[in-house]
Image (spheres, helix red, strand yellow):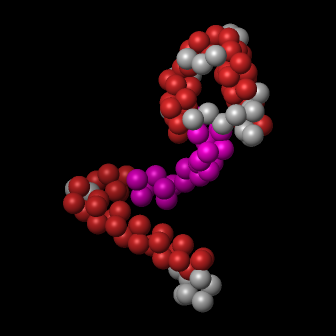
Amino acid sequence: MMTDTFVDWINEQLQIRGWSMREFGRQIGVSPSHTARIVNGEVIPSVNLIDDIARALDTSAEIVMRKAGLLPPDRPETADRREASYLFSQLPDDEQAVVLTIMRALLERRRAAKADPQTDSV
């Protein structure tokens, strides 16, 4: 079952475009009955269908997946996140790879600490 957020969002998108469920189904290439099940939140769209929905609604698959509850909500943008993104973009490719390796190691360490409370936490 899909989240109410997804159902509300899809219905809002259809209303904005003036599309019926039938037109939406035509845009994403599925039958009217399958379209109704998607719009009513009865089925979770496949990854391929999410790509088709994103294309039809002129948005990213990531946004559709977040609205559908398949990805966690995006964290709000902060000054620190903007700065980190900017600084990362200023590094050459080989140094970006090093930073990514460090970040992955930190996340893995955090996951291991959560899985085993006896481990030192980060």
Residue 15 within the segment the image draws in magenta = no
Q: Quadrant of residue 35?
A: top right
Identify the residue at image location x=48%, y=69%. 107
Front-lying residue, 97 or 51: 51
Q: Quadrant of residue 20?
A: top right
Residue 88 visible within the image: yes
Residue 9 horizontal/vertical position (percent):
70, 30
Identify the residue at image location x=42%, y=58%. 84
Residue 72 horizontal/vertical position (percent):
62, 50
Q: How many marks?
A: 0
Residue 73 within the segment the image draws in magenta = yes
Task: Classify residue 14 as left or right of residue 77.
Answer: right
The span shown in magenta is: 64-85
Identify the residue at image location x=60%, y=89%. 118
Identify the residue at image location x=54%, y=72%. 111
Task: Classify residue 121 as left or right of residue 3.
Answer: left
On the rendered image, what quadrant is the N terminus found in? top right
Residue 80 horizontal/vertical position (percent):
49, 59
Residue 37 horizontal/vertical position (percent):
73, 26
The answer to whether 14 is drawn above or below residue 67 in the figure is above
